[in-house]
Image: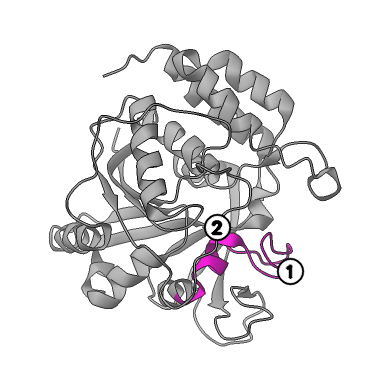
Amino acid sequence: MEKTRIIIDCDPGIDDAIALLAAFVSPELDILAITTVCGNQPVETTSRNALKICELGARADIPVHAGSHRPLMRAPIRGQFHGETGLGSCVLPEPAKKIEPQRAVEFLIDRLLRAGNERQPITICALGPLTNIAMALRIEPEIARGIERIVMMGGAYREPGNRSMTSEFNVLSDPHAAHIVFSSEVPIVALPLDATHQVILTPAHVKQFEAVSGRISQAVSQLMASWDRNQVERYGSRGGPLHDPLVIGWLIAPHLFETRRVRVFIEYQSELCMGQTIADWFDKSGLNPNTAIVTKVDAAAVIEVFLDRFSRYQDTVMQ
């Protein structure tokens, strides 16, 4: 099997944690590194959480590089549903593993330049604000040759925003970074709220995951139970949208997702609509498409894919 070489850029975060744990046991993926960013929590916390999740998943072999402390031009905002630590009610021991000495942006530039020179481009999985990726692109535009695609969770098109009336949290957290990335001509696959709100992790699902997750079942149950938004009027049931894990789901089972290629623009000037993602659905701009937006998800099949992945922890042991 030819593996997809990926770097996961994230801000753990409950749903980031679920995504990472799924990726760790997916043989289709070769995880080269994890880079962290200011988002759901300050970067010191997101970096520590990434280390903890690596140890929980017995993947201390994956290097973790700490990234940007703040958005490019705006004050940080924080996630609202992740608790004080970013991991909800889940308490994990302090990790033995340490952060790599090289900062995330420097690592991205070095690694992606090498990938471009070797003609072995890498897929970037963006689970948080796009600050690290935007900074790397601005400092060294040549890294674009080393990026196969960016698969990102972010944006809201026909669905209302989840942090403002118009905008999704990851894009609103750093709209200027999002503008840079979407203007780069790097191929993008976007999993917006329009897609993630189709896959709700219900309390019944949580019980299923707890039953199959082997040695990490207690942590998984705590993480997922903390994700219940109790907003039936918005989601149609108890539970919460499976945001960031859908990036991993798309990578390992793309046939379960439908996409539409369009040009995407980012609002980064208007305070009323700051961070809004605008899709040119009907070619009004005359510009070439730059993004494949996921529009439809086979939710039941995706849940089964993740249940299969988490069941693999029944056979894993701590390193």
Above or below, 272 against 312 in this view is: below
Q: Is residue 35 magenta?
A: no
Q: Residue at x 55, y 57 (%)?
A: 78
Image quarter (top left, top right, bottom left or bottom right) of the N terminus: top left
Element carrying mark 2: loop
Select label 1 or label 2 by which is in front. Answer: 2
Task: Tell which residue pokes out farthest to the right in this image.
Answer: 233
Q: What main secondary structure does the magenta stretch of the protein show?
A: loop
Q: Residue at x 47, y 61 (%)?
A: 129
Q: Nearer the viewer, residue 41 or 179?
A: 41
Numbered range of the magenta stretch: 154-176
Name the kind of residue labelled 1 in the image: Met
Residues under labels 1 and 2: Cα distance?
17 Å
Badge 1 or badge 2: first in the primary sequence: 2
Label 2: few (<14), some (14–19) or many (≥20) C-alpha neighbours in 10 Å? some
* The quarter of the displayed image where residue 224 is located: top right
**What is the x, y in percent for residue 4?**
32, 43
Examine the rendering and report whether any part of residue 28 can be seen: no
| Residue denoted by label 1 | 165
**What is the x, y in percent for residue 23?**
41, 35
Above or below, 32 against 175 in this view is: above
Element carrying mark 1: loop
Name the kind of residue labelled 2 in the image: Arg
Q: Is residue 173 magenta?
A: yes
Q: Which mark is residue 78?
A: 2
**What is the x, y in percent for residue 175?**
51, 73
Q: Is residue 100 left or right of residue 274?
A: left
* The quarter of the displayed image where residue 226 is located: top right
Q: Nearer the viewer, residue 309 or 3?
A: 309
Examine the rendering and report whether any part of residue 315 can be seen: yes
